[in-house]
Amino acid sequence: MKKNTIENSKVGLIVIAGTLFLLFSLYMIGKNQNLFGSTFNLRAVVKNVNGLVVGNNVRFMGMDVGTVKSIDMANDTSIYISMLINNNMKPFIKKNAITTIGTDGLMGNKLIHILPQKEVAEPVEEGDVIFSQTPIDTDDIFRSLNATSMIVEKTSLNLFEITSKLNGNENFWAFLSDTVLTQDLRNSVREFRRTGANANAMTLAGRNLVERLEQGSGLVNTLFMDSILSNQLITSLEQIGQASTHAELLLEEVKTMVIAMEKGEGTTGLILRDSMMRESILNTALNIEEGTDKFNQNMEALKTNFLFRRYFRRQERLKAKEKEAEAGNSN
């Protein structure tokens, strides 16, 4: 009898210990799942739960403040996550807060982060909905890292090939070690920069000149800008040149005729036997020569004028080229 009592006592102690352990376990589970204590319901709208399940923790500013109660599909693009949050956190979680799904550590369980915002807002209430921020998917990160590693690998292979070719190229190293050639290249680059600076200065000067001509209203601006007047001036200069040539030819013919008259050749010589007629013709020739001389003086004056100087210089260069061409042909 006594032996049965002891055995029954042992069984009773084991049952009591098991019951206490079960109650303690249920209490701890309920505490972790916020089954006991004062809580309020808060919902979040997300597009992808990324492996989140019921019972996962909810964190606010790094603290566990609740658990996931349920996960339901709202439509084909949105998912409702219902959370049980401790009542003592209600004054601190604002209505403009956003949620994001993260991981507890690098490879731990999924959880929800409630992120506060800087803007001022009212505290949340029972049944409020807060929106989510698109989370960073670890798979996307690994895919990006894989693509980046492949690019780095190809770049490393290309660099290896380039360095191998450079190591086997004696001309390249001879080029780098040639100090004279290096100095010549530096001088060339320096001259090229100087030429570029001079070209910029000339361009600026030309632009300023054109701007002054466009803004001016004098004769030079008129000659440059009025195409009709410029064409008329060129035509007038050509006509003056032709008139000068004709005058020289006429003078030569008159001199030849006068000489023939003085010798008494032909009908003209017979006429010149009359002293009065001869004197009249001589006076005419002298007047023509004097007029031609004055015309030549006027032409020389035109050559020194700044408006016609460029034209006459061009004519002189053309004549010089023609003489050189004739001299070359004669040789």
Image (cartoon, rainbow, N blue to C red):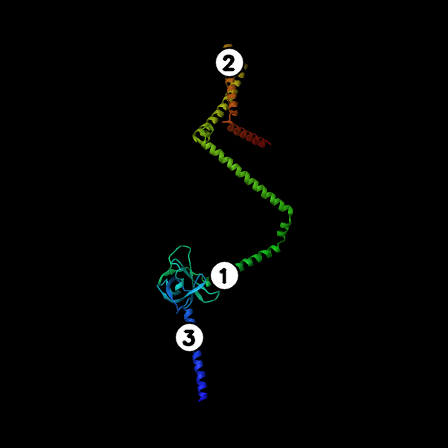
Give the structural element (helix, strand or loop) at label 3: helix
- The mark closer to the camera, 3 or 1, is 3
Q: Amino acid at mark 2?
A: Asn
Q: Which residue is mark 1?
A: 145
Q: Which of the two residues, 183 or 137, is positioned nearer the viewer here?
A: 137
Q: Position of residue 219 (x, y in %)?
A: 46, 27
The residue beneath circle 2 is 283
Locate the N terminus and report the quarter of the image it occupies.
bottom left
Q: Percent from the top left, x then y, of residue 12?
A: 43, 82
Label 3, residues with CA under 10 Å away: few <14, some 14-19, many ≥20: few
Q: Amino acid at mark 1?
A: Leu
Q: Position of residue 125 (x, y in %)?
A: 36, 61
Which residue does the image show at 42% across and 72% down from the upper left? 27
Sequence-first tag of 2 and 1 = 1
- Location of mark 3 (residue): 23
Label 3 vs label 2, nearer the camera: 3
Residue drawn at point x = 58 percent, y = 41 percent: 191
Task: Name the one closer to the observer, 236 or 159.
Answer: 159
Toward the viewer: 173 or 81?
81
Q: Secondary structure at mark 2?
A: helix
- Kind of residue at disc 3: Leu
| Of pointers 3 and 1, the one earlier in the residue sequence | 3
User: Crowding near pointer 1: few (<14 within 10 Å), some, many (20+)?
Assistant: few
Q: State how far apart marks 2 and 1 are (Cα).
A: 111 Å
Disc nearest the viewer among 2 and 1: 1
Q: Quadrant of the C terminus?
A: top right
Marks 3 and 2, Cα distance to the nearest angstrom? 154 Å
Residue 97: percent from the left, percent from the top? 40, 59
Q: Secondary structure at mark 1?
A: helix
Q: Label 2 neighbourhood size at 10 Å, few (<14), some (14-19), many (20+)?
A: few
Q: In the picture provided, is 46 more to the left or to the right than 158?
A: left
Question: Considering only order in the chain, which callout, 2 or 3, is on the residue closer to the N terminus?
Answer: 3
